[in-house]
Amino acid sequence: MRFMIVVKATKDSEAGVMPHEKILGEMAKYHEELQKAGVLLDASGLQATSKGWRIKYSGQKRTVVDGPFTEAKELIAGYTIIQVKSKEEAMEWARRFPNPSLDGKEGEIEVRQLFELDDFGPSEAVERFRKMDVG
Amino acid sequence: MTVSDAHRAIEAVWRIESAKVIAGLTRLTGDVGTAEDLAQDALVAALERWPESGVPDNPGAWLMATAKHRGIDALRRGKLLERKHVELGHELEAHQESPEGELAAALDDHVGDDLLSLMFTACHPVLSTEARTALTLRLLGGLTTDEIARAFLVPKATIAQRIVRAKRTLAAARVPFEVPRGADLAARLSSVLEVIYLVFNEGYAATAGDDWMRPGLCEDALRLGRILAGLVPDEPEVHGLVALMEIQSSRSRARKGPSGEMVLLLDQDRGRWDQLLIRRGLAALQRAEDRGGAFGPYALQAAIAACHARARRGEDTDWKRIAALYDALAELAPSPVVELNRAVAVAMAFGPAAGLEIVDSLATEPALGAYHLLPSVRGDLLAKLGRHGEARAEFERAASLTRNEPERRLLQKRAAASAERG
């Protein structure tokens, strides 16, 4: 089973502060541990929302809203995908995740299990997703 | 936290830490059997204590420290002395004073070498292939004897016995706990790769039983391969093997039909292939090639798998390239099974008659006498040439040879189809 460890954004990450050597080192060490244990599938950091945008829907109407967005805790700044045998193993790895905040103070991560397309049961729409290489 | 929650949490920690702990203890005691006993003692202690105290911040170091204390206790009672481990006892004593943090650091310094040494020890040529496989899954995969027995469909007692004997053989042969160097390294590494691929194949194409696949075993093998790639990143064949396993795993969902029957490669819904694993596999293959390993046996097989992975539709498959890769593989590592696969590729690239010619040259091959894929491939080529009567006989023969139930049903279906057309 696969889990995504989501790193929540902070004021610093939103301000475009680049991660300094210490936190990069900690993150590198942690991800090396994941790799050495054979559980790391994918990982990436995300740039600040000032470089992104949102699209809001209201019925058929779409409105583009440019970043930055303010509610840092609701935003994400990176993710790591791991493949493990149990939820407990995912928990144990998540517990070891270094504090992702750039100032070493308040930070937050969130862990979510990935859906496999097989979890949805047979449906025509799911078949079409499969053909798109997602899932 | 309930007791059973705590036990599941401890199992997870064990899965992550056990190989490192056993490896570190083997370095200290010089004996895999002793190391595993001590590690098991530490696990029992954790099961007793952690439900109340919670999982410690550095569970690996805790398990290691506890195991060492048990080792020293055993030493004092003279148990280890009988095993002539006096000098190692001194080393255990010397480490005793080290607080958990320092111990963790000391452990980290050695951990890569220790894990690698443990892999080489578990896959030592002095052991039979079966023993290597069981020991590797147990010591490095963190599987219980029961899990290994279920994976290989043999009685638990057989696996337990196999592991006990393997440990004894290693001790009797005084196999040093080390990473082999020089010319030795290549041969020993290929033994490790062979064991990992054997575990993978047992999961990917179960040789017996009702299940066509046992994906858990594939995951275990893939995990071991990825670990090994991290430990010896400069060895091209390790990346070749990882690439091969990643790409083959990418198809596992598509290989199984709705009622558990197997679906052949060209009939698979390619939309169900796992693109993340394909990307990882192609990247690993690139690493193998960058290190000058494009023509290693695993890298060649991975390159063949990659040809399939890159083809968006079955009819887009570059069969000429696959046939050429099989030519290279047959030259490098000639075997009747490779030859049979080459025949399939040649048939796809240059027509069934060209493939049949190769298959027919294998007819007297004793190694393939009971191999169901020989008549199965021959039947397929005959059917394509419109020789349905002969095809039917081959499919029936193949069905009588396989030990895998879903595969037998598929072959019987094909025999019946040939009978209708013949």
Image (tube, rainbow, N blue to C red):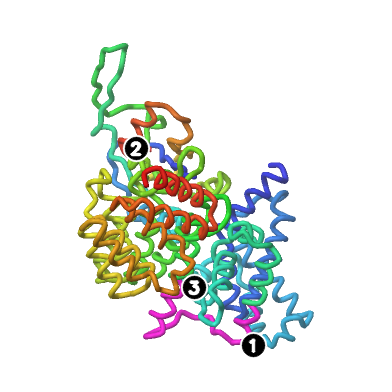
Q: Amino acid at mark 2?
A: Val
The crowd level at tag 1 (other Cα within 10 Å; few <14, some 14-19, many 20+) is few
- Whether A55 is drawn above or below B63: the answer is above
User: Residue B285, percent across and down?
Assistant: 29, 61
* B150 and B348: which is toward the camera: B348
The crowd level at tag 2 (other Cα within 10 Å; few <14, some 14-19, many 20+) is some
Is B172 colored magenta in this rendering? yes
Q: Amino acid at mark 1?
A: Glu
**Residue in view at x 74 percent, y 86 percent:** B82
Image quadrant holding the N terminus of chain B, namely: top right
Look at mark 2 in the image and give the residue it sits on.
Answer: A134
**Residue in view at x 72 percent, y 46 percent:** B3
Look at mark 1 in the image and give the residue it sits on.
Answer: B87
Quadrant of res A8: top left
Q: Is the stretch drawn in magenta largely helix, strand or loop? A: helix
Mark 2 falls on what kind of element? Answer: loop
Q: Does residue B177 appear to the left or right of B366 in the view shown?
A: right
| Magenta extent | B167-192
Q: Does residue B404 appear to the left or right of A26 in the view shown?
A: right
Mark 3 falls on what kind of element? Answer: helix
**Residue in view at x 41 percent, y 80 percent:** B187
Q: Are labels 3 and 1 assigned to the same chain?
A: yes
User: Residue A38, percent across and down?
Assistant: 45, 58
- Whether B228 is drawn above or below A50: the answer is below
For this orientation, the residue located farthest to the right is B77
Look at mark 3 in the image and give the residue it sits on.
Answer: B110
